[in-house]
């Protein structure tokens, strides 16, 4: 180490002492010494890259190996290492390029060739992968794994007849094998030859009739081609061997449901879910699709909740059971039951941030700021690097009009960073918070950031344009933003009211009346005291004073609380700059 340091220091001194060109400095160093220095530098980079790879720092390792190649382009091992790293980084095209270089430089190295075959496969070049396996088999013709991989590659390349010949020859070498049979039946299914596929599986069954996995595969073949009677017969065979076999029970339950027999469907389902040997993860996987179905088919609600209840009954000490039931209740718009179950899940396992997230989301959706504040405070302590804990804490403080605390939490979220859509949500809420605090320039900046990230965010467009109109600032910009929000969501009475109000502030009273009357076509707007007051203001400025008084009084009766409304009614006139 010391000798290397002195050598490099001496080189630095030579370079520093020379005031001539770089070429002259290099020429003054003997060629052997230059080669030795470059070799030492290359070795240093190689070992540094190896160390970075072992530490899992693939990005740095890639950089260090690439720097090595600038000094030595003739090391096949480095190309191989880069191909593996790019495979880990899920960059298949780069992985293939480096694998090709390594395999081309050393065609006898088995690992380089296997890496090339894998790189071809991840780039969907299965026929090329088969060629590589074939080349390797000439070196080691007794390697059964190579023959299997060649057959698999040919099958993926849709060269089915060649693949079947390979698997047949492999079976002659190793005997009847479930993995080979599985690949052959898949090929037959792709060739629309279900009887051949079934015959392959029946060979396994004849060898091991008690292996229920093979019977299940046979039933799936029949189900895939809608041969329901054949599938049911196979499932009945499975249940004759194991009456509580969960997958067979669920399959039979679904067949009964297709036949319209709800009672038998539930009976078979209950048997399956009451089986304690039926893994909870498999049960959750079966029930989870109901969460998506509830979005479009509310008739699935009771069934989904019933299944979730069965999981809780079978696994009363597993947090996942309660979390699933909570998700089901939340999706079914039963928030109280969802909250109870999220809390039960957290009592059993408080380490799952996803459940805390759902709890905070539900508190925000049901407007429970005190509970949201309490839980988000806890989440920020337990999960200090979780972005959404800070966001929900900011939201809770905003609801409670604790604006300084809201700003602190939201800026904390931005420091942590998160997905783009969530970061935009933070800026939107930060904009609302700054507006409520009277920091209008900061509020405007936040809204501009959101619109830069989400150019079609009609909610922010509406809020931003309305706040500008309230301040009487940048009204042309406000009008453009509001008009665009209506283009994006033309059936929003709130947006129509905002646009009318901006037109009013611009002095375009007749246009304002036209747009606010469009808003008032919606029942929602007819009950909104702010819209009614706005309409009164517009009417007064169009000299429809009696009608204006009627709408001001209607606004007051519905709870309008603007600063100037009482004076407008008392003095029977519109009071400029007192409208908000």
Image (spheres, helix red, strand yellow):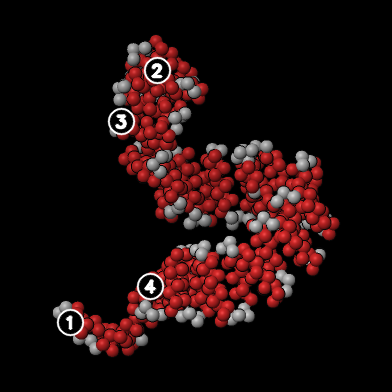
Mark 4 or 2: in front is: 4
Q: Earlier in the sequence, mark 4 or mark 1?
A: 1
How many residues crowd around disc 3 within 10 Å: few (fewer than 14), some, or many (20 or more)?
Answer: some
Residue closest to the eye, 372 or 18 = 18
* Residue 82, quarter of picture: bottom left
How many residues crowd around disc 1 within 10 Å: few (fewer than 14), some, or many (20 or more)?
Answer: few
How many residues crowd around disc 2 within 10 Å: few (fewer than 14), some, or many (20 or more)?
Answer: many
Residue closest to the eye, 235 or 253 = 235
Query: Regarding mark 2 in the picture, which secondary structure is present there?
Result: helix
* Residue 469 in picture, x, y percent from top left: 34, 30
User: Which residue is label 2 attached to?
Assistant: 536
User: Which residue is label 1 attached to?
Assistant: 24
Mark 3 or 4: in front is: 4
Residue sitting at 75 percent across and 50 percent down?
Answer: 227
* Residue 125 in picture, x, y percent from top left: 51, 64
Query: Regarding mark 4 in the picture, which secondary structure is present there?
Result: helix
Residue sitting at 65 percent across and 69 percent down?
Answer: 165
> What distance separates the C-alpha of mark 4 from that of mark 2?
72 Å
Q: Residue 397: give its label.
A: none
Tell me whether circle 2 and circle 3 mark residues in contact (CB < 8 Å): no
Q: Is residue 438 left or right of residue 120?
A: left
Q: Earlier in the sequence, mark 3 or mark 4?
A: 4
User: Which residue is label 4 attached to?
Assistant: 66
Tell me whether circle 4 and circle 1 mark residues in contact (CB < 8 Å): no
User: Which residue is label 3 attached to?
Assistant: 475
């Amino acid at each position: 180490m010391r000798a290397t340091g002195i050598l490099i220091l001496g080189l630095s001194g030579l370079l520093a002492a020379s005031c001539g060109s770089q070429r002259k400095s290099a020429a003054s160093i003997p060629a052997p010494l230059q080669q030795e220095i470059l070799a030492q530098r290359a070795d240093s980079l190689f070992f540094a890259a190896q160390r970075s790879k072992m530490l899992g720092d693939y990005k740095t390792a890639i950089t260090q190996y690439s720097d090595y190649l600038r000094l030595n382009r003739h090391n096949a091992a480095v190309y191989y290492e880069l191909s593996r790293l790019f495979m880990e980084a899920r960059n298949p095209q780069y992985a293939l390029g480096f694998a090709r270089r390594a395999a081309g430089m050393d065609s006898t190295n088995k690992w380089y060739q296997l890496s090339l075959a894998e790189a071809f496969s991840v780039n969907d070049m299965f026929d090329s992968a088969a060629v590589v396996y074939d080349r390797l088999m000439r070196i080691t013709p007794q390697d059964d794994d190579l023959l299997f991989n060649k057959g698999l590659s040919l099958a993926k390349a849709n060269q089915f007849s060649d693949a079947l010949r390979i698997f047949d020859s492999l079976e002659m070498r190793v005997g009847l094998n479930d993995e080979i049979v599985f690949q052959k039946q898949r090929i037959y299914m792709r060739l629309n030859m279900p009887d051949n596929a079934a015959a392959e599986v029946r060979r396994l069954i004849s060898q091991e009739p008690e292996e229920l996995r093979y019977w299940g595969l046979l039933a799936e073949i029949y189900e895939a081609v809608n041969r329901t009677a054949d599938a049911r017969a196979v499932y009945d065979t499975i249940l004759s061997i194991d009456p509580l076999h969960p997958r067979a029970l669920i399959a039979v339950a679904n067949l009964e449901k297709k036949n319209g027999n709800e009672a038998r469907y539930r009976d078979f389902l209950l048997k399956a879910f009451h089986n304690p040997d039926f893994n909870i993860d498999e049960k959750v996987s079966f029930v989870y699709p109901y969460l998506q179905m509830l979005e479009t088919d509310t008739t699935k609600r009771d069934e989904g909740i019933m299944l979730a209840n069965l999981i809780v009954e079978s696994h009363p000490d597993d947090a996942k059971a309660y979390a699933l039931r909570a998700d089901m209740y939340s999706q079914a718009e039963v928030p109280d039951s969802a909250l109870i179950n999220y809390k039960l899940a957290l009592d059993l396992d408080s380490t799952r941030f996803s459940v805390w997230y759902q709890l905070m989301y539900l508190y925000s959706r049901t407007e429970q700021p005190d509970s949201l504040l309490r839980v988000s405070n806890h989440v920020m302590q337990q999960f200090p690097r979780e972005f959404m804990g800070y966001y929900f804490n900011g939201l809770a403080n905003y609801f409670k009009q604790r604006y300084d605390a809201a700003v602190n939490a939201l800026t904390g979220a931005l420091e942590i960073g998160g997905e783009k859509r969530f970061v935009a949500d933070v800026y939107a809420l930060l904009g609302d918070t700054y507006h409520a605090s009277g920091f209008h320039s900061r509020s405007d900046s936040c809204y501009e950031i959101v619109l830069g990230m989400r150019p079609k965010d009609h909610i922010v467009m509406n809020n931003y344009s309305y706040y500008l109109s309230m301040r009487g600032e940048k009204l042309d910009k406000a009008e453009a933003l509001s008009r665009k929000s209506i283009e994006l969501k033309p059936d929003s009475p709130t947006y129509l009211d905002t646009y009318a109000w901006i037109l009013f502030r611009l002095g375009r009273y007749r246009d304002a009346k036209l747009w606010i009357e469009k808003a008032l076509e919606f029942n929602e707007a007819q009950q909104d005291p702010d819209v009614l007051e706005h309409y009164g203001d517009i009417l007064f400025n169009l000299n429809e004073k009696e009608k204006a008084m009627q709408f001001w009084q209607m606004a007051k009766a519905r709870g309008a609380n603007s600063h100037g409304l009482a004076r407008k009614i008392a003095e029977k006139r519109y009071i400029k700059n007192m409208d908000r």
